[in-house]
Image (cartoon, grey):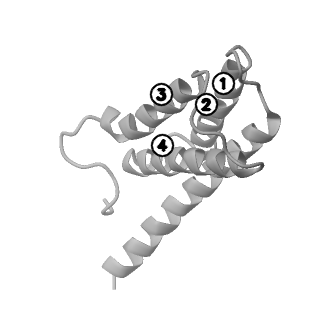
Amino acid sequence: MNGESGQGTRSPALDWLPALAWAGALLILGGQESAGPSLPAGMDKVAHLSLYGVLGLLSAHGWVRHGRSPAAALVLILAMAIGALDEMNQSRVPGRDADPFDFLADAIGVLLGFAARLRLGARRNRTTNV
């Protein structure tokens, strides 16, 4: 077993807990009438990219800890579905709207976060195997 996979008697559900908690926080935040201070034009996309980048990173972490199962594509689709669900939810919140470009920023954030976590893990494994 490599240094990243789950070990011992720890519950496999714990592998996914950080990603699930963050996804829940994103959905709660998106359901608020005001999600925070007004951002300059275009900066809201940076916020979406960053927040969903964390979701991608946590999803990749859970995936690696869970033994790289299920398929990465499924994990990515589910994480991106949180962004889609968030946008649909916002369309029903007074003062908010659904923006396909917000979803695009969410999806890119998920991909970048997932890739960053895998890259960090690969780098860590190279340094410990030397």
**Is label 4 in a helix, a strand or a loop?**
loop
In which quarter of the view is residue 1 placed?
A: bottom left
According to the picture, the residue beneath numbered tag 2 turns out to be 82
According to the picture, the residue beneath numbered tag 1 turns out to be 85
**CB contact under 8 Å: marks 1 and 2:** yes
- Mark 3 Cα within 10 Å, few/some/many (few <14, many 20+)? few
**CB contact under 8 Å: marks 4 and 3:** no
In which quarter of the view is residue 124 placed?
A: bottom left
**30 lies above or below 121:** above
Residue situated in front as seen by the camera: 12 or 17: 17
According to the picture, the residue beneath numbered tag 3 turns out to be 24
Q: Name the residue rendered at 38%, 72% in the picture.
A: 125
Pointer 2 or 4: first along the chain? 4
- Mark 1 Cα within 10 Å, few/some/many (few <14, many 20+)? some
**1 lies above or below 51:** below
- Mark 4 Cα within 10 Å, few/some/many (few <14, many 20+)? few
According to the picture, the residue beneath numbered tag 4 turns out to be 69
- Mark 1 and mark 4: Cα distance apart in space: 23 Å
Identity, as a three-letter code, of the amino acid under mark 3: Gly
Identity, as a three-letter code, of the amino acid under mark 1: Leu
